[in-house]
Each structure stands twice: as structure tokens, then as C-alpha cells.
Image (tube, rainbow, N blue to C red):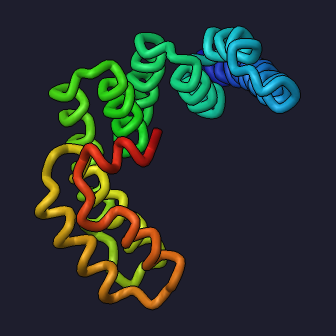
Amino acid sequence: MKILTLIIFLGLLSCKYQQIYAQAKQLTDSANAIFKNTLDPLKALPLLNKATELDSTYLPALVTKLNFEMVSNMPDKAILTAMTLIRIKPEVSEYYSSIGFIYEKMKDTISSKKYFMHAVGCYNKKLEGMSNTNKNYDWILFNKATNMILAGDEQSANYILKELYNRTQEVSFKETVKSVMNKSRQQILEDMK
């Protein structure tokens, strides 16, 4: 009898979560539609806030919310959203890079470099078990090198970039690598504005 009660309870809980998930998804989709029509992230943010109140782990809402908060110059809120994303998925380097850019925009270079280094650590973990023949390997290595430059390790990053440039055959990727090669941290940050 206790097992049957537990199964029924878990089934009800699962149904409730599916309803919450569906509502969060609908709110996120509506927020994206509002942004698509108005190009105003501030009009879409209230729906994303509702979606994340319903489901605090719904990644599409959180990622969109982070992007909208960043472009709307809401650094404190964007940092909180990025920290939530890191708590949920600590292995995603882009969340650390986002915080690095936010701190850089706030003129806090020390904190900025710290988060870019966290991103480098994530890229190192991704690369550890990956064969260099993996189709994503070079892009991950490129992103690692870019974050190394942003963290202040330009010399090591440029060594990686030169190796990537020399070994790649793909013209568009070669141009992407060249666009960052031998640039200072400040030059890259200027190019990203």
C-alpha cells in the first residue's frame, strides 16, 4: 500500500512539473515573439521573469533572460542570472565568459579576468577526453585561446592560435583565427563593442 501511495504521489508530482514546464516554455516563447516583433528586450523581460519564477531551472528562459539583461545594461541582474545558470550547469564555459564581459563593462578587470579563467578551465575539461580529430575540437580550442587572451595570458593564447592557424585547411575558420591572432586583450574587447 505504501509503495502504491508513493507511485501515485510521484505521478502527481510529475504531472504538476510538466504543467509548470509547459507554462514556462509558453512564457519564454511569448517573450521571444515580443522581442522579435519589437526588438525591445525590456518588453520581453517580464515574461522571462515569470517563466523563471515558475521554473527556476528552465534553461531557455534563463539564457534568454541573461542575454536580454546584458543588452539592456542590467549588470547586477545579469550576474545573478548567470550565477543561476552556473549553479545548474557549471560545465558551460559561456556562462563564465558572460560574467567576465559584464565585469569588464563595469570596469572591474580583476573580477573579469577571474571569470575568463574559469571559462578556460571549462574548455580544458572539454578538451581533456576529446580527440583532436573531433569536429568541435578546433572551435573549443579557439574559444579557450580567446578566453586566455581576455584573462591576460596573451602569449600562451597566441601560441595556440598560431598552431590552429597553421594546421587548419578551412578558409573561413583560418580567417576567424587570424582575426584574433596577435591581438591584445584590449584590442579584442574593442572589436567586440
Which residue occupies the foreground of this view, 30 or 169? 169
Question: Who is closer to the viewer here, 118 or 57?
Answer: 118
Position of residue 91 relative to residue 18, above or below, is below
Q: Which of 107 and 69 is in front in this view?
A: 107
Q: Position of residue 20 (x, y in %)?
A: 73, 18
Marks counted in the figure total 0
**Residue drawn at 51 percent across, 24 percent down:** 70
Q: Looking at the rendering, which quadrant does residue 30 occupy?
A: top right
The image quarter containing residue 53 is top right
Percent of width and height locating residue 147: 28, 50
Would residue 9 be visible to someone looking at this image?
no
On the image, the x and y values in percent for residue 54 come to 66, 12
90, above or below 180, in the image: above
| Figure quadrant of the N terminus | top right
In screen coordinates, is 3 left or right of 174?
right
The percent coordinates of residue 149 (x first, y second) are: 23, 52
Could you tell me if residue 36 is visible in this image? yes
Residue 118 drawn above or below residue 63: below
Q: In the image, what residue occupies the spot 31% across and 24% down? A: 103
The residue that appears at 34% across and 36% down in the rendered structure is: 96
Quarter of the image holding residue 116?
top left
The residue at 85%/29% (across/down) is 33
